[in-house]
Image: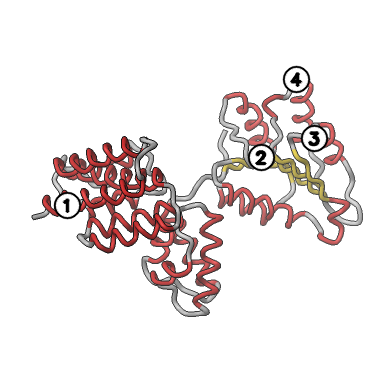
Amino acid sequence: MAAIGEQKLKEKIRTSPLGAYFIYGDEDYLKKIYVGKIVSAVVDDDFAEFNFHKFDGKEATLGDVYDSVEAMPMMSDNTCVLVEDMPLDTLDESGMSMLNEMVVNIPDTCALIFYMRSINPSSKIWDSIKNLFDEYGTLAKLEKKKNEDIVRTIENAAKKRGVPFEYGVAKYLIECVGSDLNTIQNEMEKLCAYALGRTVTRADVDTVCSKSLEAKVFEVMRLLHSGRFENAMAKLETLIRQKEEPTMLLGAFIASYLDIYRARAAVVSGLNAGEPAKYYDYKRKEFRLDNASRDGRGLSLPAIYECIEILAKADDLLKSYETDKNLVLEQTLTKLAATESDARR
């Protein structure tokens, strides 16, 4: 069983869009996009009411789907049957026989799409179903892209709109808004509209984009690590005024120092700063270790331990109902700044 990826699926849709599809994977944006491409390639918009059949797989029966697959096109050449999130792993022997009949003997005028929008078909029960589509249809798994691939996607899409990105800005955009492709697409559209044909800069991202809480807190940390304590405190106070949850803010503080610890420990051991990505969940966030290596320069492991201990005590205080949580955050930032300043002297 070998599921195809984005490029082969794109070619399949371009050259021969009819047939049976099983589309799954962890990249929601790409799944949605390519399901739409299949429908667009097969369905005549003027007669979609007659030839496009969409089912909620949690409500419809396999018999409903079978009847639509067997229906003749009306005033058009083809039909398309889209089934979202049908729990095929619960089919009995009769149901599996019907599914097998549909996929193996699908009419040459039909595109049948089983779209796993929110279901993750990862258990072994799904293997026989995947094998069926692999052998007689198209089994496509759309996985999350690596950051370098997303950077190229952003830059190429922006160029097509006549709005190039300055070097490094696409990577910075990912750091600010995360690597969800739906979010990136929306933010890129905002940037292109804002730039009005000129080159998009880092300052544009700061002005226009809705940054994730993680990105906002890491800005505080970057200012702190670079010795700009007053700026870091001002940023923190802004987040507090925006009523960000104190425990979430502290959690991001802790994440920053854990990144520094891991990157620093790797370097001290003679390894690359990115080595911890092999052992911890940094998928599509590998840049954090590079940033941590830079931010932690000049800090010894004992100094980093001391910072983590400060954060652990702050975490205990935040769990106390009688504590002024915002004051705890401000005091913690002050203690971290003093520790880093002493360590770098």
Mark 4 highlights which residue? 93
**Residue depth check, mark 3 versus mark 1: number of the one nearer the observer:** 1
Amino acid type, callout 3: Ala
Estimate the spatial distance between the alpha carbons at disc 3 and disc 1, rounded to whole Å: 63 Å
Q: Which mark is residue 60?
A: 3
Residue shown at 52%/75% (left/top)?
194
- Residue 289 screen position, x and y as percent: 29, 49
Q: Is residue 305 left or right of residue 166?
A: left
Amino acid type, callout 2: Phe
Whether residue 104 is visible, yes or no, is no
Mark 1 highlights which residue? 338
- Residue 64 screen position, x and y as percent: 84, 35
Q: Earlier in the sequence, mark 1 or mark 4?
A: 4
Estimate the spatial distance between the alpha carbons at disc 2 and disc 1, rounded to whole Å: 57 Å
The way the protein has been coloured in the rendering is secondary structure
Up-down relation of residue 230 to residue 194 (above or below): above
Q: Residues within 10 Å of mark 1 (few under 14, many from 20)?
A: some
Check disc 2 and report its element: helix, strand or loop. strand
Residues at marks 3 and 4 touching, judged by CB atoms closer than 8 Å: no
Q: Residues within 10 Å of mark 3 (few under 14, many from 20)?
A: some
Q: Earlier in the sequence, mark 3 or mark 1?
A: 3
Mark 2 highlights which residue? 22
